[in-house]
Image (spheres, grey):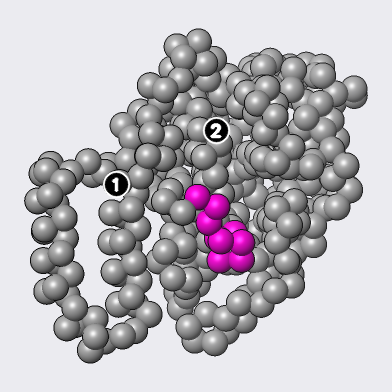
Amino acid sequence: NAHTEAINTAADGVQISEYFPMLAKQMDKVAIVRGLSTTQGAHDEGNYFMHSSYTMRGTIQHPGIGAWLQRMEGKTNRTLPGSVCIGGGSVGGGAGFMESKFAPLYVGSPTSGVPNSKSNVGTGEFEDRLMLSNKFDQAFHDRYDQKKVRAYSDMYDDAVRLMKSEDLKAFDLSGESADVRAEYGDNGFGQGCLLARRLVENDVRHVEVTLGGWDTHNNNFQAVERLAGTLDKALGALLKDLERRGMLEETMVVLCTEFGRTPHINENDGRDHYPKAFSALIAGGGIKGGTVYGKTNEMGTEVVEGKTAVPDFNATIAYGLGLPLDQVIYSPSKRPFTIADKGQPIVSLFG
């Protein structure tokens, strides 16, 4: 029977899977939340809940934490987007009912830069076309001076500002040495984590990097060993790199999923969806490294200590970012919402 061994880590008394040898060396910087539990056992619903702290409804779209961060704290870099998603979008991670300017910029491939950011005409001609476009639109904007119309023109202004910005080079990974790029791993997720570091360095407030493929209903052990190798190399490099640059204390690194996998192995040597008990990691951003919060029983089927609902986990992130958990923001239909829907932060994770 296939099984996974536990290995010791840089944190006394904390063990993790043998598939994460690089991360094991960094565990003195990491807190593990071992008692996560949710009722959302389908991918889209679980993903939405994990990103927004609210369950999916047909009548409203809730904002993700990147949108909340921008709405409450503003952008730090005037020309770069406040939020970027690399390697695939996330359900519930967008602007929701907030204005579109709080939505993330989606970057499919970390090595391709920002799509459509280069003009294929000369500077003078581009400016002429832009002036002509504004002239055509002016009467409409004057007649319909509404938030949604303004948002549309603001999007154009932001795009043009980004195209002209020197900071656009933050998206260019060729600015990194071959050694650093190799350290993160020669794959989309590894290079995505390196791009995330470059963006945070250039004052992008919120960056999400996605690594898919974990839906291991079949051949769980082969797939997880391969995926874990990619994740381990990239995350281990990111934590080491942030610390080396003096950025870890002010950068919160979060690793999570929408639900766990069944503790038992199915007939296809796979593991199925299991929302009842799973784990997540938080590092940096004032987190007390080498700590573990929550506990499951020996089989991993039940949380027996420190049960953590998804809104509590997101409240912990928001608390670490210094965001006001009780500040109410109203949707266009005047319904009140808070960043983590009454979630309570795990304050003991902070040093």
Q: Residue 261 in the image: state x and y as whole percent.
A: 62, 39
The residue at 68%/15% (across/down) is 21
Which residue position holds label 2?
197
Quarter assignment of residue 8: top right
Verify whether residue 24 appears in magenta: no
State the residue in front, 25 or 71: 71
- Residue 300 appearing in the image: no
Report helix, strand or loop for mark 1.
helix
Question: Which mark is on residue 163?
Answer: 1
Verify whether residue 75 appears in magenta: yes
The residue at 35%/44% (across/down) is 165
Q: Residue 336 in the image: state x and y as whole percent.
A: 62, 81
The part of the chain drawn in magenta is 69-77
Q: CA distance from mark 2 to mark 1?
A: 21 Å
State the residue in front, 68 or 211: 68
Residue 323 against residue 148 in the figure, above or below? above
Label whose residue precedes the other's in the sequence (2 or 1): 1
**Label 1: few (<14), some (14–19) or many (≥20) C-alpha neighbours in 10 Å:** some
Q: Residue 294 in the image: state x and y as whole percent.
A: 84, 44
Question: Which mark is on residue 116?
Answer: none
State the residue in front, 299 or 67: 67
Q: Quadrant of the C terminus?
A: top right
- Badges 2 and 1: C-beta atoms under 8 Å apart? no
